[in-house]
Amino acid sequence: MSDTSHGKNATFTLTDNRDGKAYELPVMDASVGPSVIDVRKLYAETDCFTYDPGFTSTGSCESKITYIDGDAGILLYRGIPIQDLAEHSDFMEVCYLLLYGELPTGQQKGKFEKDITYHTMLHEQIANFFRGFRRDAHPMAVMCGVVGALSAFYHDSTDINDPHHRMIASYRLIAKMPTIAAWAYKYALGQPFIYPRNELSFAENFLHMMYATPCEEYKVSPVLSRAMDRILTLHADHEQNASTSTVRLAGSSGANPFACISAGIASLWGPAHGGANEAVLTMLGEIGHKDNINEYIKKAKDKDDPFRLMGFGHRVYKNMDPRANVMRDSCHEVLEELGIKDEPLLDLAMELERIALEDEYFVSRKLFPNVDFYSGIIFKAMGIPTSMFTVLFAVARTVGWVAQWNEMVEDPSQKIGRPRQLYTGYTERPYVPIDKR
Ligand code: SDX
């Protein structure tokens, strides 16, 4: 296969060595990053599928929302570097940016925040769903169930072809996720649900619903709410990761947005994806002390051992995940501001990072800490239980999921997602009656 030219009407020539036939495949150029070879007509012309399990070299869609340069460790939301947004912006502004493509004016931001705030309450009957779960249910299981059930309550925002319905459903999902997350936590504790308060910011409201009780005034710590707001920004979107691709594929059939986001939550739960932040804390607890690090590094390198160094490696980043850098800096800040002098888990994590980044196995495979490596340590310092870590990831990622879902629905070239396969099973054979087997 050769690349005949760059720019307009560029093509790749694909030669079939079985019969010498050559095929011209159009190249589509990106505004930044890799071009794509348009293979939409390949099967019709060559009677062959492409084959790319895990989609390591496959673009599933055209998008204008988020861009990652994995080699350079760059992450842009609508072109703006994540570091700048983490430092200068806030989560509501980032939600507006991801949904609408531009940073809001003061007036736009004020209206958006008010619109989101007025969707934070849940229909009173939804509280009954929580009571159907065991108290020790994993909060991600509760979140999957309750978010999926929202489609049974909000029939006035499930027509995906109506832009107004899509906007209302998107706002409802962004606004209600913190309430659902906090209520899942309260239900596990056996404490009463705390209702959202409209005078609080998004992050303050979430912390208030998590930690307040009806018995006394709860003051949200500005340190914790600022840290929470920044963590939500860092986790908001990330191109076509597994859970976002799940949302897009579910949405491509015309399924309602609540069902699509519930599917995304299920995918995020996996330890190879959003479940890694919980798995990192479990791993650090297992390692226990710096003296044991080398034994676990050995396990991580052993092909016969399923153990992986959780919080390390990434399909796209072959450099430090820029979010991990911001997260590590926040870690130090939050621990210091909370007066936590020496957090043994942080010391252990930093020693693990130092040793791994000097080890040839990790260096040669470009395995760096990712966003999940430090997030769990901050969450623990903020008093958030390990089982809630991925729930927080889902609260943050909901804006990315709905932004990508809207982009998919609005894409004129969008079709139902229906991959093909390489079939290597039996060719046709006769049915054998049971008395002849
Ligand atoms: C997230 O996609 C996204 O954008 C996700 C995310 C988002 O914001 O949405 O960034 C969030 O999911 C971050 C990733 C969180 N997961 C973990 O921390 C779990 C540990 N990491 C691994 O499971 C793994 O690195 C993945 C799943 C993240 C990436 O897997 P890939 O791209 O399929 O890489 P691979 O399995 O092909 O690994 C390449 C090599 C292999 O060794 P060889 O076969 O070449 O000898 O690296 C090794 C792997 O065995 N390897 C690891 C490792 N990760 C990869 N070895 C030890 N420990 C690890 N963590």
Image (cartoon, rainbow, N blue to C red):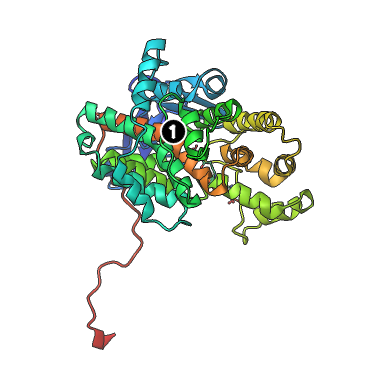
The residue nearer to you, when weighing 1 against 92, is: 92
Residue drawn at 31 percent across, 67 percent down: 426
- Per the image, the residue denoted by label 1 is 239
Residue at (72, 32) in percent of width and height: 339
Regarding residue 258, the answer to whether it shows in the image is yes
Q: How many marks?
A: 1
Please rate how many residues cluster around mark 1, counting C-alpha atoms within 10 Å: few if below 14, some from 14 to 19, many from 20.
some
Instruction: Give the x, y percent position of residue 239.
Output: 44, 33
The residue shown at (32%, 29%) is: 407
Q: Quadrant of the C terminus?
A: bottom left
Viewer-closest of 77 and 398:
398
Residue 151 location (% of width, % of height): 26, 43
Question: Compared to 73, does 55 lie above or below?
Answer: below
Q: Is residue 307 left or right of residue 149?
A: right
Give residue 416's quadrant in the image.
Answer: top left
* Nearest the eye: 176 or 273: 176
Q: Residue furthest top?
A: 106
Q: Quadrant of residue 398?
A: top left
Amino acid at dot 1: Glu
- Across and down, in percent, residue 9 comes to 33, 22
Quadrant position of the N terminus in the picture: top left
Q: Which element type, helix, strand or loop, lies under badge 1?
A: loop
Residue at 32% x, 45% y: name it.
126
| As drawn, 194 above or below 168 | below
Residue farthest to the bottom, as pictured = 435
Query: Residue 161, percent across and down?
Result: 20, 32
Direction right: furthest residue = 291
Q: Quadrant of ligand 1?
A: top right
Mark 1 residue CB less than 8 A from any atom of ligand 1: yes
For the question of whether residue 145 can be seen, the reply is no
* Side of 328 relative to 386 (left or right): right
